[in-house]
Image: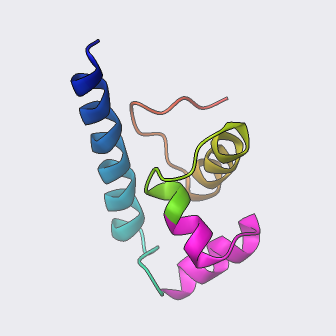
Amino acid sequence: MPMTEAKGTMYQAIDNFSSFLNKNGYRLRSDARKRLTNDVGMNDQRFSALVNGKTHGRAAFDKLNEIFNYVGYSGENWVLV
């Protein structure tokens, strides 16, 4: 897969997850989002950076999978372990 296509796939997956959060009551500054960030042990700024693809590494991968499990997300283009 060319780099341009890979980046496009990643950005689409990020947008899909953001849409999922918004549609399921986890909008920015909502009570559900505050509860989610508290339960996974993050502040809102770190949470936003993570779900927007600005945080990298194994710890980010693990935390993102924890969030997917918490909200019940299983969209395509994400690797869940």
Q: Would you place residue 53 above or below residue 21 in this image?
A: above
At a point 70% along the width and 42% down the height, the residue shown is 62
Q: Quadrant of residue 20?
A: bottom left
Instruction: Check if residue 46 falls in the magenta segment.
Output: yes
- Image quadrant containing the C terminus: top right
Residue stretch rendered in magenta on the structure: 30-48
At a point 61% along the width and 48% down the height, the residue shown is 64
Q: Quadrant of residue 52?
A: bottom left
Give percent across and percent down for residue 78.
48, 33
At a point 32% along the width and 49% down the height, the residue shown is 16
Drawn side of residue 41 relative to residue 34, left or right: right
Q: How is the image coloured?
A: rainbow
Q: Main secondary structure of the magenta part?
A: helix
Give percent across and percent down for residue 27.
41, 77
Drawn side of residue 1 relative to residue 26, left or right: left
Between residues 15 and 22, which one lies in front from this camera angle? 15
